[in-house]
Image (cartoon, coloured by chain):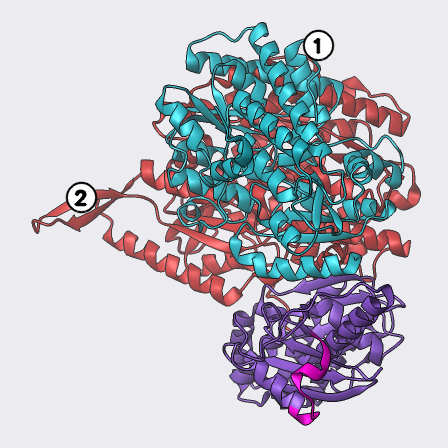
Amino acid sequence: MVDEKKDIKPKKRSTATRAAASIGPMVKEFITGTLKARAEGKQKLAYTFIVCHHDEILRAMDVVPLWTENFAGICGAKRDAERFLQRAESLGLSRSLCTYALCGIGFDQWREELGDMPPNAPWGGLARPDFMISSGQILCDPRTKWYQASQQFMPDVPIYNIDLPYPLFQRDRDHREVWDYYHKYIVKQLRGLISFLEEQTKKKMDYDRLSELVDLTDRTWNLIDETYSLRKAIPCPMGTGDAMNTMVPLCFMMATETAYNFFLDLKKELEEKIAKGEGEVENEKYRLMWGGGLPSWYALNDFNYFNSKGASFPVETTYRMVVNLNEMDIPQTNDPVEHIAWRWLGFWTFWYDKAKQRPDSEPDVERLINWIEEYKIDGIVMHEAFSCRTWHVGLLWQLHQLSKIYKPIPIFEIGKDGEKRKVYRELPSLVLESDIIDITSYSEVDTRNKIDAFIETLESIRLNRAN
Amino acid sequence: MELYFAGIDIGSTMTKVVILKDGIITSIIGPTGPEHKRLANKVMEDALKKSNLTLDEIAYIVATGYGRINVPFSDKQITEITCHAKGVKYLFPKARTIIDIGGQDVKGIKIDGNGRVNDFVMNDKCAAGTGRFIEVIAHTLGIELSDVGDISLKSRNPSTISNICTIWAQQEVAASLAEGIPVSDILAGIHRSLADRIVRLISRLKIEDEIIVTGGGAKNKGLIYAISGLLDRELRVPNEPLITGALGAALMGKEILERSIKSNIPIEKRKRILEEVEV
Amino acid sequence: MNYHKNNIFEEIFRLYRDYGSRVKRLNEEGKKIIGYVCSFVPLEIIHASGCIPFRIRGDLNEPVTKADSILEPIICPYYRSCFELCLKERYNFLSGIVIPHACDSMVRSYSVWSYSLPYSYFHFVNVPTVCGESSFEFFNSELKTFIKSLERFLNTKITEDDLRRAIRIYNMNRDLIKNIYEFRKTSPPLISGTELIMTLIVGCSLPVEEANQLFDEVIKELKIRKSSPLRKGPRILIDGPCLDNIELIKLVEDLGGNVVADTICYGTRDQFPMTDETKNPIEALAERYLDKLNCPKTYRENKAGSFEGDIANRFWDIGKYAKQFNVDGAILYIYKYCDPFGFEVPARKAYYNSINVPLLHIEDIYSSGTIGQLRTRIQAFLEMIE
């Protein structure tokens, strides 16, 4: 197995906010906490996935979540994923599959075979769970198959798979015609999760506590939305690079006071920066949107590279997994589980109505257009990670459709008659290619060349913009 | 019974012929050539000449390798997997795992106590895990292919080549040279990278001793050293690592004929013509 | 339709080669053709609406060029080929396409398909991932939504009787196919794997009544066959997803294998489960497509409590058919980028091991260019199990 501890360590990444800088130690503490909990044996530990809207349920039952995607991301960021990926391959799994899952399954098999953590496991390793909670959610097959595959090596660890569908966007349909039975199903699935947890923990769900946590989550969602909206300021005080850190409390600590307080602090910090006119970039020339794709966890330095060229990232679609509850048009209910289910449906169908109002638009495209305008965006960057169909299939088409229906940049053009006229063109876009944690797919030289070329395009448009 | 058997292994770069009686009479290696229709029969002719035999005196001829289909002078074609297994078992009775490193592909073969294949893996989709990788890099460095292994063994501080793609690795090598990194270190890194790819492939098998390495790659001491290090196991290499396929093919021919005699079921044989092989 | 009685397989080959020619003609005569992919689309519902369901195929020899500019190459290569052919107007006779929730490749490219292709009707059938009681309740409602959408599109009503009739005729279709499979049990089989898969592929391109007629003719022919078209060789089971062409099976048989069994989408996975005619039609269809259809995409809870028990439950069909058809070896043929099957490889391997059936695992892309590599692997495998 290749020893990945490189002679040349990647340069330490700098963040725009103090809040983002505090994340590294926060995650480490979290991992250490899980190992401690495992050793003490008082709480139950569960492998699970982020953004399943089940955080409140887990927290209410005092279950410690082991975020397996997070652990794989850590391996990737530390550039120590390859040995686990190879382990998975040796079992017969294809490298073309989700590399988070490969890393996880490889790690699990190794840990179970040794009866102990693999040598030098990142930050002490991933604790053995008491049970595993899957959720394919219609958009991710690995989330249904991953734990099932790991269960081969942990046959005594049961799985509960929460089915969480949502109606796909269909232009000539109204999703509200169907979402009653979707809601009914989701509620039953969540109640099934609660029963499963009650059985596993031998405790009953405290519905008052659950209601409190649901309320806290709603408030946290609204707070995050307000906080991130501050990035509309010019210059932008915080970029996607930082957001790839602040996604930690958003995705891994939802339904906790810690998460809420984190965003209170972040909001304050951003307000201070805006008051001082302090941006992510000192001389902000280009405002970019990260239009889609999970980041390359081993190459987050590339955001600093963008910064060094005068580019900031006021907004991203990745991990922006909240919508202001007040903007969501969902039925009101006092039952916390029913509310979670409505919130789920409300989130995933949020852009449907707006998309129908614009000819040829589509929810993801509509979101891009809205945010381009709200955040004053000059260009879009997409990242295609080869092992993830869930978040990457469709990005090319979104750019294609966006350029078809949305041309906001006025430039002067010399027509055939020699006359100068104003035409409108689409936003420039850049597509980067590599993976989430498989570093062998990444070429720094290649990536930076692409970024340079893109910056040149942005500069050319900036200079030739007709106003 | 004084019977002669022949095996011909038509690889992408080299064609090998082995003529067998009780032991190996003759083995010949010649280039396959750009179109293998031209040279397979030439290699066969050379082998016959060297052993003073005519085509008809060979009781059974088996063709194997990439170009095994439509060999007009063979009696049967069998894959190189089965043939390598047979050939290696003959030379190394305790062999259980075979790693064949060819110019354009890499194979891992598991055999049981009787020399029968019970599992195999192949990678023929990409240059990165094959001998081609070393060839390209040697060319980039301006070094003879036959020297790369020895030079790499001189390294005290192997560099790490992170890119597996041959094209990107070339870029990395060029960059490393510019930085003043010694050629031996670069080569050691390259060998480790290739070894890593190979180990990745064969890890899908349950690797057991004795492990035998065959093919052109087996002649590269640097590569053997790197693979041995990654597996943390001893490897064995035949004196002539290129002929195990052809040897196994000849042995298969012997087996087929003996089986037919024992069971009294005549084997189908077609007319053999010692002429150019059709692609 | 009258088939030349002596040349039924020649007729089938013609329909395979000119795939879609029959429904193209029917469309010209005024019939509406609805395209679909995958096993999870309830064909009975399309049939009950008065339209003809038509299974979309890819083409191994058609390079993917148009699709690449708007669809990432990291999706199922077979599905991508289907999209490519739609873009190249191979299926212009379609009035619409129905896509089920079977895998990420389908779900994530649904918008791309529905915005890029010129058909008037698109529908997504949201098949649940898990298989619990509430899942059937949900799926029942989804099927009703599907029915309503067809009714709206066609300005018609689909009655319970229409559904019952459709269920009946599709069950007949499956009975006929099971009948044909019986001829695989002899040694060597009276129908080759190549002939069978070709027949089944063609069957999916015809109106079900005509497919039934075709299968009748095939059975008649097989009954009078005196000898096998194959020489006796190792009996092989093919396991995997949608194999919509004869290439792989033909290669195995050219190399001396006898393909006598399968658990692939065009084969037993799709064709063997029956719809319960005693139940309410929608409930019966929900049960058939969600529970009876055995596909990796459907998550089955581990009720056995052990790995061995779990795989015996999940892969019961492999075990059953391996035994019934007396197989000597199996080939697990999977496309690159396939999550549902890809994640199951270690478990499937362990299962084959537990039933002592040697296994060759192949990962392929969808292209005629890989035949050379497949040849060596398959031949080596056949040599191994001889």
Give the residue displayed 91% in from the left and 26% down from the top. A202
The percent coordinates of residue C82 (x first, y second) are: 48, 40
Q: Which residue is mark 2?
A: A422
Tell me the element at label 1: loop
Frontmost residue, A168 versus B205? B205
Determine crowd level at label 1: few under 14, some 14-19, many 20+ residues with C-alpha closer than 10 A.
Answer: few
Q: Would residue C129 be seen by someone viewing this image from the given angle?
A: no
Frontmost residue, A277 versus A355? A355
Relative horizontal placement of residue B114, taking residue B174 as reference (left or right) = right
The percent coordinates of residue A26 (x first, y second) are: 71, 48
Q: Distance from label 2 to label 1 (Cα)?
A: 67 Å
Chain letter, disc 2 residue? A
The magenta stretch spans residue A158 = no
What are the residue bounds of the magenta stretch?
B49-61
Give the residue displayed 52% in from the left and 83% down from the top. B140
| Marks 2,1: beta carbons within 8 A | no
Q: Which residue is mark 1?
A: C279
Circle on res. A136: none
Query: What shade has chain B been given?
Result: purple
The percent coordinates of residue C113 (x first, y second) are: 45, 35
Q: Are marks 2 and 1 on the same chain?
A: no
Q: Amino acid under label 2? A: Lys
Q: Would residue A108 be seen by someone viewing this image from the given angle?
A: yes
Frontmost residue, A36 versus C364? C364
- Residue C198 sits in quarter: top right
Q: Amino acid under label 1? A: Lys
Which chain identifier belongs to the red chain?
A
Which chain identifier belongs to the cyan chain?
C
